[in-house]
Image: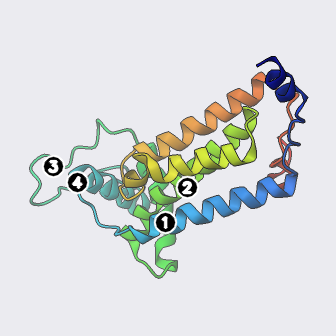
């Protein structure tokens, strides 16, 4: 038992991944998750909340005001937008403005934001794993498990506020972890620039 513990301590720790390796792995992870989410993507609202967010984004993009037009056939959402925070629809309004330049259309362009939010969150999980000192394989495994083995996968198909909230929380956690340990190298900075 003592010999095994001594052998474990004598084993060299793996070198942290190089700058380029982290950037390539992060880009590959993002592309893989976006590809998987795209396979199940339909871009059609399934709930009245999604309809409300889309209408808010359309209103903000077209008229500059955040308002909900009456959604006919929907008794719950009858022009009420006061109780909904605006950030989700404000981000979607940008996609709505870009949609005419894309081959998909306005509503699918708005809905595609969720799959990008979720894939970016998977990349942040990978970076969090590296920041915590885990091996590249462990961090990548955690990110893949997050992306395909949790509720993140089905939420990537929806237009709920959960996906951008998840992205912002993961980004805040990574920033917090980096602030606690500024001496730790951040290998992905080669791809995105210094802090």
Mark 4 and 3 residues: CB-CB less than 8 Å, in contact?
no
Dot label at residue 47: 4
Using residue 38 as the reference point, say whether residue 187 is left or right of it. Answer: right
Q: Secondary structure at mark 1?
A: helix
Q: Secondary structure at mark 2?
A: helix
Mark nearer the viewer, 1 or 2 = 1
Crowdedness near tag 3: few (<14), some (14–19) or many (≥20) residues, C-alpha within 10 Å: some
Dot label at residue 36: 1
* Sequence-earlier tag: 4 or 2: 4
Q: Nearer the viewer, residue 142 or 66?
A: 142
Is 86 situated above or below 113? above
Is 14 situated above or below 154? above
Dot label at residue 80: none
* Sequence-earlier tag: 4 or 1: 1
- Image location of residue 37, percent across then percent down: 46, 63
Residue pointed to by mark 2: 119
Furthest-top residue in this view: 2
Crowdedness near tag 4: few (<14), some (14–19) or many (≥20) residues, C-alpha within 10 Å: few
Query: Distance of mark 4 from mark 3, alpha carbons?
Result: 14 Å
Give the image's coloring scheme. rainbow
Query: Distance of mark 1 from mark 3, alpha carbons?
Result: 35 Å
The answer, for residue 182, to whether it is visible in the render is no
In the image, what residue occupies the spot 80% across and 22% down?
Answer: 5
The answer, for residue 152, to whether it is visible in the render is yes
Residue pointed to by mark 3: 78
* Sequence-earlier tag: 1 or 2: 1
């Amino acid at each position: 038992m003592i010999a095994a513990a001594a052998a474990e301590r004598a084993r060299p720790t793996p070198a942290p991944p190089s700058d380029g390796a982290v950037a390539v792995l992060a880009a590959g992870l993002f592309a893989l998750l976006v590809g998987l989410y795209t396979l199940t993507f339909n871009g059609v609202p399934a709930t009245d909340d999604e309809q409300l967010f889309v209408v808010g984004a359309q209103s903000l993009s077209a008229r500059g005001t955040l308002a909900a037009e009456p959604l006919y056939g929907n008794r719950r959402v009858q022009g009420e937008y006061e109780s909904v925070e605006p950030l989700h629809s404000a981000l979607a309004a940008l996609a709505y403005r870009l949609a005419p330049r894309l081959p998909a259309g306005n509503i699918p362009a708005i809905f595609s934001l969720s799959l990008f939010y979720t894939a970016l969150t998977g990349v942040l999980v990978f970076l969090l794993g590296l920041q915590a000192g885990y091996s590249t394989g462990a961090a990548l495994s955690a990110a893949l498990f997050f992306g395909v083995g949790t509720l993140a996968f089905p939420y990537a198909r929806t237009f709920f506020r959960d996906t951008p909230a998840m992205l912002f929380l993961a980004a805040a956690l990574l920033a917090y972890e980096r602030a606690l340990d500024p001496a730790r190298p951040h290998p992905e900075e080669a791809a995105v620039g210094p802090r």
